[in-house]
Image (cartoon, grey):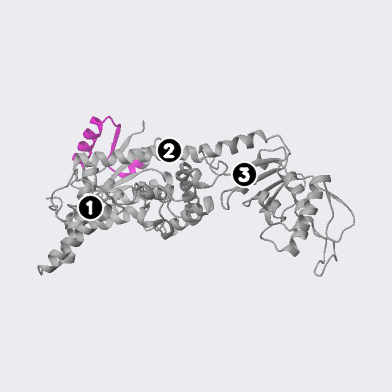
Amino acid sequence: MKSIWIVDDDHSIRFVLEKALTREGLPVRSFSQTREVLAALEEDTPQVLVSDIRMPGGSGLELLNTVKKQLPGLPVIIMTAYSDLDSAVSAFQGGAFEYLPKPFDLPRAVELIRRAQEESERESVMEEAQVQMPEMLGQAPAMQDVFRAIGRLSQSHVTVLITGESGSGKELVARALHKHSPRAEGPFVAINTAAIPKDLLESELFGHERGAFTGAQATRRGRFEQAEGGTLFLDEIGDMPLDLQTRLLRVLSDGQFYRVGGHSPQRANVRVVAATHQNLETLVKDGRFREDLFHRLNVIRLRLPPLRERREDVPLLARYFLQRSAGELGVETKRLSEAALQRLVNFDFPGNVRQLENICHWLSVMAPSLVVEAKDLPQELLSAAGPAASHGNGSSDVTPVGSGLLSAPASLPAPGVSLPPSPDAWVAEMAREARRLLAAGEPDVWDVLTRRFEASLILTALDLTRGRRIEAAQKLGIGRNTITRKIQELNLDA
């Protein structure tokens, strides 16, 4: 097990943390200066780094910046005096996992380090799983048939038809089929037949001779010739015009085609992989797709499941996309809180993997902090009711705490309060209390009720998490700084 590294010029701080962590069975190394840490990093790496901000010979923020460049996934906890909150903000901006204000409560400090250790272990597991991520499309059971089919087809030249909703990753499957085929050394050429006007599609596929039409000033090789010896991926094949379907059928039947305006047959040594989001059987019945071409393409069919059928892949995919976006933008990789991640998992993703990728890119640009909270997600997720929400167990929704919400003393939690008979009962109770206070002419009714509401929410969350503020903040969907500030404003520490 890797060690927890403590960096502080104060011997008493190091001693107290060493003893507490050792009692917890955690290995510890201590350093009094940042240069000692930098020297140690040449030979070893910690599982968690806990560092003071102000030290002679180099600040904790400078150490944070250096360590994050070498070990971007390492959780770093910054210790700071209460007057150093500006520095704490800088620490978060630099990628710190959390800050620990001095003087600190020792059990809570150990708990925070435990959480950072768990985060470090999750990072390691995810990084190992991430190695093959660009090719591995998912690890859910719904994807196993696809993986097995790719393996079975690895030595085959047979035509393959991939079906699946838009954005589900059909081209990635086609590329995997090519990469693991005998044609892997040849080119992979892709064309979206729905994205090219009908008048140009024939030339794009088969090429043209010089003078074949106005503007054809030179002979041009089409996609079939460009893919010679390799794989041609025909995406959205269901949108191909009927006259071109006839030409495609001829190529698949006898391996020959003619350029537009040409008279000499061209040989096509190409493996065709086609894909569609449409139901080709329905198109055949409607007369919009040739039945003989359908049977030519439908030799092997692979159905790619939508993302909502493999929700367990969402965390791995989200992490990969966040890492890739961060690399493209040159910023620190954002991390998803448990509440935010659960929102993603519960979302149906009508745009499938492509939509998840776009959301992760948006978060890399727009999320205000390194840890993405549920409230930071784009509106399309916040306004959507996921599958869990319809059953009353949405992860980031706050559960009503009962009819005593507004009358419970602010300094006392209300564990074990029974749920109201309907989800709106607590709203009715709040309305009755508001009416009573307004009728009595009480001043500042807004502030009074708001404080009671916030206090009851926070105390209930703290009761559920046994006093763990960070976890309570995550459950409530607010930031760690927000819950700390609210606890002070509402005098909940008393």
Using the rendered image of the protein, determine whether residue 36 is visible from the camera's viewpoint: no
Q: Nearer the viewer, mark 2 or mark 1?
A: 1
Tell me the kind of residue under disc 1.
Answer: Leu
Residue located beneath label 2 in the image: 124
Which quadrant: the N terminus?
top left
Residue located beneath label 3 in the image: 173
Magenta stretch: includes residue 10: yes
SS under mark 2: helix
Q: At which x and y percent is residue 309?
A: 50, 44
Report the front residue among 194 and 267. 194
Q: At which x and y percent is residue 93?
A: 35, 55
Does 198 sit above or below residue 356? below
Magenta stretch: includes residue 282: no
Indicate the quadrant where residue 288 lies: bottom right
Residue 457: give its label. Answer: 1
Q: Residue at x 81, y 70 (%)?
A: 214
SS under mark 1: helix
Q: Earlier in the sequence, mark 3 or mark 2?
A: 2
Q: At which x and y percent is residue 431?
A: 20, 62
Separation (CA) of disc 3 from disc 2: 27 Å
Separation (CA) of disc 2 from disc 1: 35 Å
Give the residues drawn in magenta, as a range: 9-37
Tell me the kind of residue under disc 3.
Answer: Val
